[in-house]
Amino acid sequence: SGQRSKSRAGSSFEHHVKRMLEDGGVPFEEQKFIGNQRPDFILPSLKVFENKTRKRKDAFILSLKTLLRERWKQVLRENKASDLFLGTMDDSIASASIADMKDHGIYLVVPESLKDSTYTEYAEHDNVITFREFFRSELLKRKEIWLKNGLKFDFGSA
């Protein structure tokens, strides 16, 4: 039953993030295969992601892992030519791992309480951002690109 509550926590976490994307009018597709990987969310779409001529900033992956441990290395295989955002509630990721992630274009997205906490390694790393920064900054940076490419994107118009 420990396993079941872990997966329930994971699915609740995914559900919350999906709701925030939907409520924000952010274009995304979920659980689509990229090779043999199936990340939680591809933004703005699989079609854009797989377009060989797109720029790095035009698309990205958002994967969620309630507990990360060393599993971020699995996520690396999903990451070809795009940034990868890894949402987690894990408060025990080592500084060396975070630096490693940065070398691979991986951003950790964590709750504000973890980013600000003195007992996590997060505050010193610029590739660790809060969910608020993810929505306010990373998504808005891409809004122009996505609109220019004819995608609907209502987020941030309020």
Image (spheres, rainbow, N blue to C red):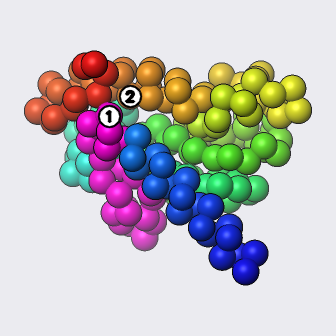
Q: Is residue 111 visible?
A: yes
Categorize mark 2 by other alpha carbons within 10 Å: few (<14), some (14-19), many (20+).
some
Point out the stretch of residues depicted in magenta. 21-42
Residue 103 image offset from top left, x and y in percent = 64, 35
Left or right of 111 in this view: 11: left
Query: Which badge, 1 or 2, comes first in the chain's sequence?
Result: 1
Eyeballing the image, is 41 above or below 25?
below
Q: Main secondary structure of the magenta part?
A: loop
Q: CA distance from mark 1 to mark 2?
A: 10 Å
Image quadrant where residue 126 sits: top right
Q: Nearer the viewer, mark 1 or mark 2?
A: 1
Q: Can you identify the residue that label 1 sits on?
A: 24
In this image, 71 relative to 133: left or right?
right
Q: Which mark is residue 139?
A: 2
Identified by mark 1, the residue type is Gly
Helix, strand or loop at label 1? It is loop
Query: What residue is rendered at 31% in x and 21% in y?
Result: 156
* Identity of the residue drawn at 57% across and 45% down: 86
